[in-house]
Image (cartoon, helix red, strand yellow):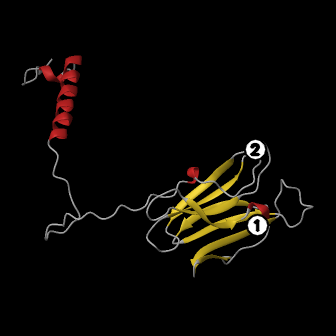
């Protein structure tokens, strides 16, 4: 048997103490790195110091939970099914659009789509427009607010003879603010089922 030229080294055989020492060293590096962070980066260009004038805080986004909707639900409560926000009238403040229906024990109650705004000086939000009236007996799907417009897919019925479980009409709708009112248009490709 040939003997190695170098004596056997103690660190070539791992023992639990070696793993504990390695773990302790890594923990010390991680803990130490949390104290040695670089300065925060900013996207501001260097130049004159900003003035101490603070901009007025934007009005809060209208909360549908604080609004009484023009629904006749009897003893049932109204339910906000979906909501989205965006600046619909171009005034720099966000409006909230809410899809709302009466809480029903069963079935699919018709939806209403309402635009909410908050007064400039603060105060309780209010309904300023009805885009879909629940009396039209439609269900709203694929609802969104983007680029100053409200879009939705409306499911409905072609006649009173169609069972209320199975809508047989499908329309795409888009509403935009135009000359002080919301104008509805139907995007290209809209069709009935």
Q: Quadrant of residue 190?
A: bottom right
Considering only vertical position in the picture, is 171 above or below 23? below
Q: Looking at the image, which residue is at 76% across and 44% down?
A: 75
| Crowding at mark 1 (Cα within 10 Å: few <14, some 14-19, many 20+) | many
Residue 192 picture location, percent across and down:
78, 70
Considering only vertical position in the picture, is 7 above or below 188? above
Q: Is residue 153 left or right of residue 90?
A: right
Q: Quadrant of the C terminus?
A: bottom right
Q: Quadrant of residue 157?
A: bottom right
Q: CA distance from mark 2 to mark 1?
A: 30 Å
Q: Is residue 82 left or right of residue 155?
A: left
| Crowding at mark 2 (Cα within 10 Å: few <14, some 14-19, many 20+) | few
State the mark number for residue 170: 1
Residue 92 picture location, percent across and down:
43, 70
Residue placed most toward the observer, 3 or 187: 187
Residue topped by disc 2: 75
Q: Quadrant of residue 115?
A: bottom right
Q: Nearer the viewer, mark 2 or mark 1?
A: 2
Q: Looking at the image, which residue is at 62% across and 73% down?
A: 175
Q: Secondary structure at mark 2?
A: loop
Q: Is residue 87 left or right of residue 192?
A: left
Residue placed most toward the observer, 165 or 180: 180
Q: Is residue 47 left or right of residue 90?
A: left
Looking at marks 2 and 1 on the same chain, the residue that comes earlier in the sequence is marked by 2
Q: Secondary structure at mark 1?
A: strand
């Amino acid at each position: 048997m040939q003997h190695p030229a170098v004596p056997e080294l103690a660190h070539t055989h791992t023992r639990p103490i070696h793993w504990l020492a390695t773990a302790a060293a890594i923990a010390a590096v991680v803990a130490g790195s949390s104290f040695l962070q670089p300065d925060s980066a900013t996207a501001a260009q260097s130049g004159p110091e900003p003035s101490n004038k603070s901009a007025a805080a934007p009005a809060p986004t209208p909360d549908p939970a604080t609004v009484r909707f023009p629904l006749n639900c009897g003893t049932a409560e109204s339910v906000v099914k979906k909501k989205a926000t965006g600046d619909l009238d171009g005034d720099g403040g966000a409006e909230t659009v809410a899809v709302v229906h009466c809480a029903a024990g069963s079935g699919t109650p018709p939806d209403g789509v309402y635009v909410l705004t908050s007064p400039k000086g603060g105060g309780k939000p209010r309904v300023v427009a009805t885009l879909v009236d629940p009396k039209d007996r439609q269900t709203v799907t694929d609802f969104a607010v983007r680029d100053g417009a409200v879009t939705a897919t409306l499911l409905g019925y072609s006649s009173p003879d169609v069972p209320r479980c199975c809508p047989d009409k499908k329309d795409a709708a888009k509403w935009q603010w135009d000359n002080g009112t919301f104008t509805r248009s139907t995007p290209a490709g809209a069709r009935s089922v």
